[in-house]
Image (tube, grey):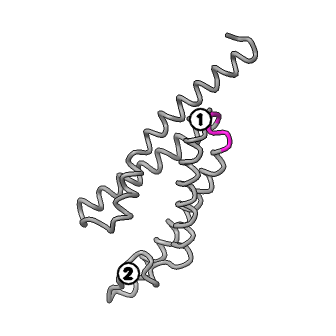
Amino acid sequence: MAKKRILQAILAIIGSVAVITGLLGILFGIKDGFYEISFSHNIQGNIILDSNLRYFSGLWMGLGLVIFWVIPSIEQKKSIFRLISGVIFIGGIGRVISIVSMGNPSTPFILFTLLELLFPLLIIWQNKISSSEAGLLAERVGIL
């Protein structure tokens, strides 16, 4: 049960970061410097970059809300948790490609990348919790 609570706490932190940073991205876009993005002389490029940042911020915020939905019954929502984890991992791969092709971003984004790449480990953790919860349930109903 303690392992489940720890995983739930970690997911609550990750969900909070996703919701907060997603909301900030939606509200502020590239204009105020929150993401330290400088404007180019290409106004159309700025508009497209801002639109994409706000759109993907909305997706990120939505993913955070789904994480909150999963937390209470993490042991039962195996498929959706794996889907979320896979999506976040693929996002991390995208960041690695960006680092290789464009250079290092600011420190928070390097930390986000590391977290995203480690997300599959949470699948293993969730699987162990799910298996142990199933065993406890079977013992309670007298199956084992």
* Rendered view: 62 above or below 43: above
| Nearer to me, 112 or 85 | 112
Does label 1 or label 2 sit earlier along the sequence? 1
Image x and y of residue 72, in percent: 68, 43
- For the C terminus, which image quadrant? top right
- Magenta segment includes 74: yes
The residue carrying mark 2 is 45
Residue 36, quarter of picture: bottom left
Amino acid at pointer 2? Gly
Q: Residue at x 52, y 54 (%)?
A: 14
- Magenta segment includes 114: no
Callout 2: SS: helix
Callout 1: SS: helix
Using a 10 Å C-alpha cutoff, classify the residue at mark 1 as few (fewer than 14 neighbours), some (14 to 19) or many (20 or more).
few
The residue carrying mark 1 is 2
Q: Residue at x 53, y 48 (%)?
A: 10
User: Which disc number belongs to residue 124?
Assistant: none
Residue range highlighted in magenta: 72-76
Image x and y of residue 69, in percent: 66, 49
| Nearer to me, 13 or 88 | 13
Image x and y of residue 109, in percent: 37, 63
